């Protein structure tokens, strides 16, 4: 239960970071070119972010949920993905590199899932190797 609460808190932190990270990417151009004032740009971005929910719904989230194979995904993998996304978002923000927080989150989850799968495969390979080698060693010791 503690791990789940930690993930929820980190997801809220990611959401907060996403706000100032992506808002800067979306608003910087229109403010720098003096098309809109900073206040107008923030209102404009907030309005269209709100409108996007009603027009587009959860298309991306639905696609990810339908295509992800969740058999071996556990809370540790989700925790690692969120932490990776937070770190990458903060790094790109600090260095002034424009990047997408949504793509960062998907990349964090994908990387964590791949690392988890490699770990599971490696553990199973070691167990299989031991199951094959140890009986041979027993035969060698007996002879």
Image (cartoon, helix red, strand yellow):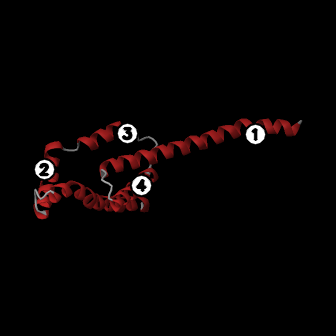
Which disc, if any, is residue 134?
A: 1
For marks 1 and 2 on the same chain, the one whose residue lies earlier in the sequence: 2
Which circle, 3 or 1, is nearer the viewer? 3
Q: Quadrant of residue 7?
A: bottom left
Q: Is residue 134 left or right of residue 19?
A: right
- Residue lying at the far front in this picture: please name it: 33
For the residues labelled 3 and 1, say whether their Cβ atoms are less than 8 Å apart. no
The crowd level at tag 2 (other Cα within 10 Å; few <14, some 14-19, many 20+) is few
* Dot 1: element: helix
Query: Distance from label 1 to label 2 (Cα)?
Result: 64 Å
For the residues labelled 3 and 4, say whether their Cβ atoms are less than 8 Å apart. no
Q: Nearer the viewer, residue 70 or 11?
A: 11
| Residue 52 x/y as whole percent | 16, 48
Q: Residue at x 13, y 44 (%)?
A: 55
Quarter placement of the N terminus: bottom left
Q: Residue at x 21, y 54 (%)?
A: 26
Which disc, if any, is residue 84?
A: 4
Q: How many marks?
A: 4
Name the residue tied to disc 2: 51
For the residues labelled 2 and 3, say whether their Cβ atoms are less than 8 Å apart. no
Query: Distance from label 4 to label 1 (Cα)?
Result: 39 Å
């Amino acid at each position: 239960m503690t791990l789940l609460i930690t993930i929820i808190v980190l997801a809220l932190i990611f959401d907060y970071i996403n706000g100032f990270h992506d808002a800067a990417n979306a608003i910087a151009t229109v403010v720098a070119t003096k098309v809109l004032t900073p206040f107008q740009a923030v209102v404009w971005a907030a309005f269209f972010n709100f409108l996007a929910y009603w027009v587009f719904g959860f298309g991306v989230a639905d696609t990810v949920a339908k295509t992800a194979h969740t058999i071996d995904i556990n809370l540790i993998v989700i925790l690692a993905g969120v932490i990776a996304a937070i770190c990458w978002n903060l790094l790109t923000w600090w260095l002034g590199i424009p990047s997408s927080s949504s793509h960062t989150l998907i990349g964090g989850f994908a990387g964590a899932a791949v690392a988890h799968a490699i770990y599971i495969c490696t553990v199973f390979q070691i167990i299989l190797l031991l199951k094959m080698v140890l009986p041979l060693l027993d035969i060698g010791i007996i002879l």
